[in-house]
Image (cartoon, grey):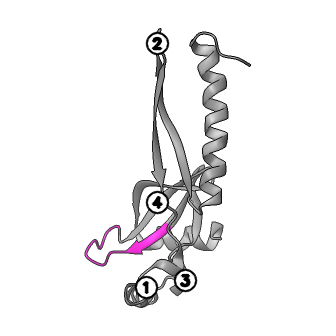
Amino acid sequence: MKIEQFNKHTLSVLRSEIQTALNDIAKKHGLSSIDMKNISYNAEGTSFTTKLEARTLAKSIDPTFLQSQKRLFRMYGLPEDSIGRQFQSGNQTFQITSFDSKKPKFPVLAKLVVGGRITERGFKFPIERAKSLLEKFGA
């Protein structure tokens, strides 16, 4: 389709094609996502913004930090390999990122997973809740 004028329909088509290309680029370079955010248009043209998110791999975590986290998880009765494990709560999926012993009510920290991508939105869980969710839904 050749774009002669920008309007809602042409932007919808353009957005879809650009997002597909951005997904291919992210996959090629090992990134979790490159998302197109806002898109707007006027008589002269269009503009859009993107968000680049780098994938956090377990092997890139500092070994000293990982050892201290394993110790904390074990001490509080959670599996040592809890970092990176995913579970479901309600209809949402979460991935455990760390344990914060300075927050006794909600020490298990996790990120929301949407469409297979880890978001920046953080959540806190009490130990018993995290333990039961990992047993029930843990991956």
Q: Check disc 2: other Cα within 10 Å, few if <14, some if 14-19, many if 20+.
A: few
Element assignment for label 2: loop
The residues tagged by marks 3 and 2 sit, at their Cα atoms, a distance apart of: 54 Å
Mark toward the start of the polypeptide (1 vs 2): 2
Residue at 64%, 66% in the rendered image: 137
Pointer 1 with pointer 4, Cβ within 8 A? no
Q: Tell me which corner region of the image, top left, top right, bottom left or bottom right, holds residue 66.
A: bottom left
- Judged by its main secondary structure, the magenta piece is loop
**Quarter of the image containing the C terminus?**
bottom right
Badge 1 marks a residue whose secondary structure is helix
- Amino acid type of the residue tagged 2 in the rendering: Glu
Mark 1 Cα-neighbour bin, 10 Å: few <14, some 14–19, many ≥20: some
- Residue, far right: 1
User: Quarter of the image holding residue 6?
Assistant: top right
- Left or right: 109, with 134 as reference point: left
Which residue does the numbered mark 3 point to in the structure image? 81
Q: Earlier in the sequence, mark 3 or mark 2?
A: 2
Q: Which residue has dot 2 on it? A: 44
The correct choice, above or below, for 44 with respect to 17 in the image is above
Residue 4 in which image quadrant: top right
Q: Are marks 1 and 2 in contact (CB under 8 Å)?
A: no
Per the image, the residue denoted by label 4 is 111
Taking 113 as reference, is 122 left or right? left
User: Residue at 52% of width from left, 65% of height from top?
Assistant: 95
